[in-house]
Image (tube, rainbow, N blue to C red):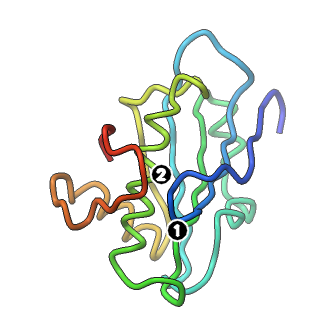
Amino acid sequence: MKDSQIYRDIVYSQSGMKLDIYKPVETITSLPVIVFIHGGAWRVGDKESVSFGLPYNEMVEQGYVFVSINYRLSDEATFPAQIHDCKAAIRWIRAHAKEYNIDPERVGVWGPSAGGHLAALLGTSDGIRDLEGDGGNPQYSS
């Protein structure tokens, strides 16, 4: 990937989940972020699946920060742990926005299969306390 920075295995939640950040080299303005949530029927997969044909490098080249996250799989924890992890990731990104030159008001989320389900749930569950979890950074919006 040309002219980019990669930060791997950053712990973002109290449950120990990790994320990877792919971003353009330092810029003057804050950049929008795209968060990728992997699929895998809630049972398999991880943030590394981003390397299997996803155009994240093109997104970075076009001026986006790209973040790929892990969440607890169903054999590790039952629902709603997965959405708790995803919301913790969004709050962590907002809490660390300045450090990574991210615009905390321009956050997009997507994913295939279970990741798509979690992305949709992120977008439709604002204000539902039972789905927030306690993964950290509660002062930030998920």
Residue 66 in the image: x percent, y percent? Answer: 60, 42
- In the drawing, does residue 44 fall left or right of residue 48? left
Q: Is residue 79 above or below residue 47?
A: below
Image position, residue 131 (x, y; %): 26, 65
Q: Quadrant of residue 134?
A: bottom left
Tell me the tag on residue 43.
none
Task: State the residue lying farthest toward the right.
Answer: 2
Q: Residue furthest bottom?
A: 75
Q: Quadrant of the N terminus?
A: top right
Instruction: Please tell me which residue lies in front, 2 or 70.
Output: 70
Q: Amino acid at mark 1?
A: Tyr
Residue 55, relative to residue 101: is it above or below? below
Quadrant in which residue 65 is drawn:
top right
CA gap between label 2 and label 1 equals 9 Å
| Label 2 with label 1: CB-CB less than 8 Å | yes
Crowding near the residue tagged with mark 2, few <14, some 14–19, many ≥20 C-alpha atoms within 10 Å? many
Give the quarter of the image for residue 7: top right
Residue 87: x %, y % from top left:
38, 55
Q: Amino acid at mark 2?
A: Ala
Of all residues, the one furthest to the top in this rendering is 28
The residue carrying pointer 1 sits among few (fewer than 14), some (14 to 19) or many (20 or more) residues within 10 Å by Cα, namely: many
Comes first in the chain, label 2 or label 1: 1
Q: Which is more toward the observer, 15 or 112?
A: 15
Q: Secondary structure at mark 1?
A: loop
Residue name at image x 62 percent, y 39 percent: 59
Determine the secondary structure under disc 2: helix
Residue at image location 51% in from the left, 56% down from the top: 13
In the rendered view, tell whether residue 131 sits above or below residue 63: below
Residue 98 position in % (x across, y down): 53, 22
Q: Residue 71, labelled with which disc?
A: 1
Q: Residue at x 46, y 83 (%)?
A: 77
- What residue would you read off at disc 2? 89
